[in-house]
Image: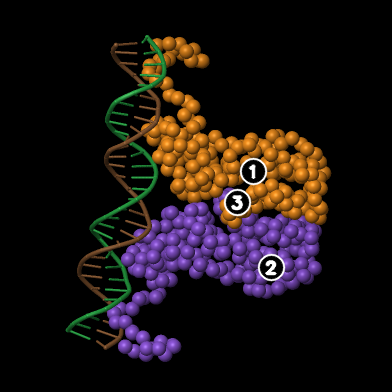
Chain colours: A orange, B purple, C green, D brown
Amino acid sequence: MSVDDLTGTTTTRKAGRRRDVSKDDAILLAARELLAERGFDGMTMDAVADRAGAGKATVYRRWSSKVQLTVDAVVCARGVAQTVDDIPDTGSLRSDLLAIRYGRPRTDDSELMSGLMSAVKENPEVAAVFHEQFVRTRVNLMRGLLERAQARGEVRQDIDLDMVAAVAPAMIAYRKMVAGQRIDDEFVVQMIDTVILPLATGSPATAAPLDR
Amino acid sequence: MSVDDLTGTTTTRKAGRRRDVSKDDAILLAARELLAERGFDGMTMDAVADRAGAGKATVYRRWSSKVQLTVDAVVCARGVAQTVDDIPDTGSLRSDLLAIRYGRPRTDDSELMSGLMSAVKENPEVAAVFHEQFVRTRVNLMRGLLERAQARGEVRQDIDLDMVAAVAPAMIAYRKMVAGQRIDDEFVVQMIDTVILPLATGSPATAAPLDR
DNA sequence: GTAATACGGAACTGGTGAGTTCCGGAACCC
DNA sequence: GGGTTCCGGAACTCACCAGTTCCGTATTAC
C-alpha cells in the first residue's frame, strides 16, 4: 500500500513491471502510417505491432479492437491549425489562406484521409471521428477566415458562406482522392487565385499579386 | 456443321445447351448494386451470384476474376450524358447545367463511385476505368459547357477553364463521399447559383432567375 | 436417343486476418 | 530473493472469401 496519487486517497501501488507508456505513441504512429499507406483494410494488426516493435498481445492489451485503435490514432493526429485563432490575421485573405499550408509540419494527412474512406462507409464510430477531424474542422476554418475577411470589408457580404467555405476542402480532397493527383503548392496557389478569391471578393481573376 | 454466321464462313454450331445471354446483364446489374451498397471489398462473388439468381460457377464461366467483373460492371454503367453534344444548347449556362441532372434515369452512380474508391487505391485496372468513367468524362463535360458559354459571350474569357470545370464535380463528390450528405436538387441549384455561375460569369451572386 | 454443353447449388481448397493464448524473459515492488 | 506485472514472439482458433470442382438437371444439335 502507498499514498501516491494526486487525490490523496490510499491506493495500491501495483508490484511488477510497469507499462511502457512510450509504446502507446509508437503503436499509434505505426497505425497512422499504415492507415495512410494501405488504408483501413490494408492495415493489419500484425503489421502495426511489427512496425511499432511490439507484440500483437501488447497492442490488444491497450486497445480492445482494430476500430478502437484506428479511432484513437486518428484523434491523436490532430493538425496544428484547428481554428481561425491559430491563423494570425495577416490583413489579407490571400495571405491567410496561404498561411494555412505552412502550419503543417506533420505527416501528410490527406493520405490518412483517403486511407480512412473505406472504413467510414461501414463503421459509424470511425465515421464520426473522421467527420469531426477532416470535415467539420476544415470547413469551419475556411468559414472563419471568410468571416474575418468579410469584417475587414475584403469579401462581399452576399456570398453563401457555407457553400464557399466548402469549395477549397472539396477541391483538395477531390484532386487527391478521386483524381489521384498530387497537392503541390502550385495547385493550391492557382486554386486560391482563380477560384477562392474571385468567388469571395467578386473581383476578376486577381491577376497574381505574386509574393512567392 | 452448318453455315450460319454473317460472314458466310463454315462454322461448327456446337451442340448442347446455349449460354443464356440475359444472365450477363443480371450478373452485371447485381455486381453494380452490391458495389454501390457495400463497396468493392464488401461485394462478395457469392452475393453477386445469389442476387443474379446464378451459380458462382456460372459467374466464373463468364468473367475470370472479381476484378474483371468489376471493370465490366462499371464500364457498362455508362450514364446518358457523356459529352457536350448530348446536352442541347439551351442558350444559357445555367439551363445547360441544370439539364445535366435531368438526363439521369439510371441508378445513382455516386454510390457506385464511392463504392469503388477502395478498389481504386490498390487495383490499377479498376483505377483506369474509374478515372475514365467518373473523372475525365465529368470534367470534360463541364469544360465543354463552359467553352460553349464562352463562345456565346456569357462567360469571361480569362477564367482558368480546367480549374473551374473541376469545381462542380469536386463539390458533389465531396458532399457525397466525404461529408456523407445527400445530393438533392436544392444543393445542386444552390451550388450552381452561388459558386459556378458567379465564378464563370464574374457577376455577383446571380440573384436567382428562378425558373423552377 | 445420344452426346455435348450450360445451368444452379453445394462442397471444397487455400490464403488471410482479427483476436486469443501461452511462453520465457525482463522490470519492478517489497 | 520472491511475487507480480509487462514484454515480444509465436502458435493458435475462427471466420470469411476468391476461386475450383463436382453433381444432378435442363437444353440443344444431330
**Quarter in which the N terminus of chain A is drawn:** top left
Tell which subunit mark 3 falls on: A
Q: Position of residue A178 (x, y in %)?
A: 58, 55
The CA span between labels 1 and 2 is 31 Å
Do marks 1 and 3 both belong to one polypeptide chain? yes
Judging by the rendered image, the residue that carries numbered circle 3 is A176
Judging by the rendered image, the residue that carries numbered circle 1 is A138
Q: Position of residue D17 (x, y in %)?
A: 37, 55
Which-is-in-front pick, marks 1 and 3? 3
User: Residue A47 lies in what quarter of the image?
Assistant: top left
Q: Position of residue B8 (x, y in %)?
A: 42, 90
Judging by the rendered image, the residue that carries numbered circle 2 is B144
- Among the two numbered marks 1 and 3 on one chain, the one whose residue lies closer to the N terminus: 1
Judge whether residue A43 can be spotted in this image: yes
Which-is-in-front pick, marks 1 and 2? 2
Query: In the rendered structure, which amino acid carries the disc numbered 3?
Result: Lys
User: Residue B88 lies in what quarter of the image?
Assistant: bottom right
SS at circle 2: helix
Query: In the rendered structure, which amino acid carries the disc numbered 2?
Result: Gly
Tell which subunit mark 1 falls on: A
Q: Eyeballing the image, is A16 above or below B142?
A: above
